[in-house]
Amino acid sequence: MTALDVPRETIMQDYLLTNAVFMAADSMDTATIITKANAGDLASQFNVAMAVEADNMKMVFRVFDDLYGNGIGYLREVLGLSVADINNLRQLYLDN
């Protein structure tokens, strides 16, 4: 998501919702979970129960910033993606 210039707040919401979906899969189907998510409230409820915290993702962002300048720096330095690779990802996954 970082490669696609998704705002960090959106990445955080997605992270928390994804954890809620995976943990709830045994008792509810995914469509029901997403339908009832209501602006992240469901994700917050599941994450409290599972001790999944936004601080985990904040730490990832801090590492990106402190060690690599930002998330793109991490993608380039650690994962070895070139500017062309990142642009290709954007072309594949984003509407123009």
Image: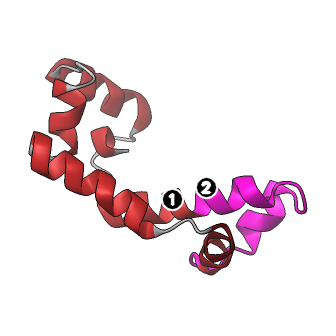
Going by the numbered disc 1, the residue's amino acid type is: Asp
The residue where tag 1 is placed is: 14
Q: Which mark is residue 80?
A: none
Residue at coordinates 21% horizontally, 35% vertically from top-left? 74
In the image: residue 90, left or right of residue 34? left
Residue 94 in the image: x percent, y percent? Answer: 39, 40
> Mark 1, residues whose alpha carbon is within 10 Å: few (<14), some, or many (≥20)?
some
Is 6 drawn above or below residue 73 in the view shown? below
Going by the numbered disc 2, the residue's amino acid type is: Thr
Disc 1 to disc 2, how far (Cα)?
A: 6 Å
Q: Nearer the viewer, residue 87 or 51?
A: 51
Residue 9 in the image: x percent, y percent? Answer: 35, 67
The residue where tag 2 is placed is: 18
Residue 87 in the image: x percent, y percent? Answer: 24, 27
Residue 84 in view in this figure: yes
- For label 2, the SS is helix
| Residue furthest to the front | 51
In the image: residue 77, left or right of residue 25? left
Residue 7 in view in this figure: no
- Contact check, label 1 and label 2, Cβ < 8 Å: yes
Looking at the rendered image, the quarter that the N terminus falls into is top left
Q: Is residue 31 magenta?
A: yes
* Residue 84 lies in quadrant: top left
- For label 1, the SS is helix
Is 84 drawn above or below residue 5 in the view shown? above
Residue 63 in the image: x percent, y percent? Answer: 22, 49
Residue stretch rendered in magenta on the structure: 17-40
> Mark 2, residues whose alpha carbon is within 10 Å: few (<14), some, or many (≥20)?
some
Is 62 drawn above or below residue 54 in the view shown? above
Residue at coordinates 62% horizontally, 71% vertically from top-left? 43
* Residue 25 lies in quadrant: bottom right
